[in-house]
């Protein structure tokens, strides 16, 4: 059974930094594309960053230049470095791992970690 566990959230002042971690167990993280999602209070969840199995990355416009996603396959962990945080970055952050085996989609989610950015 594949499990994802996020950590690293907390309370930070605007302009500060946090590093979120998504630890993968039950399988090698290297075979999964991993995405971080943000759900702001009262809003729908949105994707903020992704990293493919090749290491290619992509970011939402709202976080480009401020957030960096990376993966350490040896540690089975994916990170989200969050710099220059803004109050609108407040919310719950979830990691998601996806893999396709032929046409079968394997899709796993973590429980989320809370980030609060004070102004």
Image (cartoon, rainbow, N blue to C red):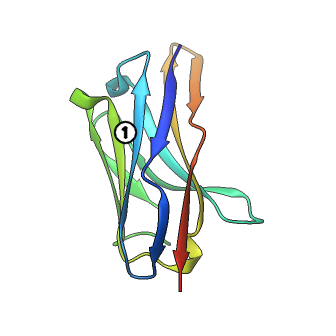
Q: Residue furthest bottom?
A: 119
**Residue at 39% across / 69% down in the picture?**
64
Residue 95 visible (yes or no):
yes
Q: Residue furthest front?
A: 11
**Residue at 43% across / 75% down in the picture?**
85
- Residue at the disc numbered 1: 52
Q: Position of residue 7 (x, y in %)?
A: 45, 46
- In the picture shown, does residue 99 fall above or below 92? above
In the drawing, does residue 75 fall left or right of residue 109? Answer: left
Q: Position of residue 31 (x, y in %)?
A: 36, 23
**Closer-to-camera residue (41/31):** 41
**Residue at 40% across / 34% down in the picture?**
23
- In the picture shown, does residue 48 fall above or below 102? below
Name the quadrant containing residue 66.
bottom left
**Residue at 58% across / 45% down in the picture?**
112
Q: Position of residue 70 (x, y in %)?
A: 29, 47
- In the picture shown, does residue 58 fall above or below 99? below
**Closer-to-camera residue (44/113):** 113
Q: Residue furthest left?
A: 74
Density class for disc 1 (Cα within 10 Å; few <14, some 14-19, many ≥20) is some
Q: Look at the numbered disc 1 and give the secondary structure of its residue.
A: loop
In the drawing, does residue 11 fall left or right of residue 29? Answer: right
Name the quadrant containing residue 81.
bottom left
Q: Position of residue 22 (x, y in %)?
A: 42, 40
């Amino acid at each position: 059974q594949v499990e994802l566990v996020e950590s690293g959230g907390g309370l930070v002042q605007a302009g500060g930094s946090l590093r979120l971690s998504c630890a993968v167990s039950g399988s090698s993280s290297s075979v999964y594309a991993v995405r971080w999602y943000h759900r702001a209070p009262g809003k729908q969840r949105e994707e903020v960053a992704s990293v493919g199995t090749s290491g290619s990355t992509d970011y939402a416009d709202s976080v480009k230049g401020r957030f960096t996603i990376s993966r350490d396959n040896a540690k089975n962990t994916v990170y989200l470095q969050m710099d220059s945080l803004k109050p609108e970055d407040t919310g719950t952050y979830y990691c998601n791992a996806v893999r396709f085996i032929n046409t079968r989609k394997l899709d796993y989610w973590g429980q989320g970690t809370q980030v609060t950015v004070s102004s």
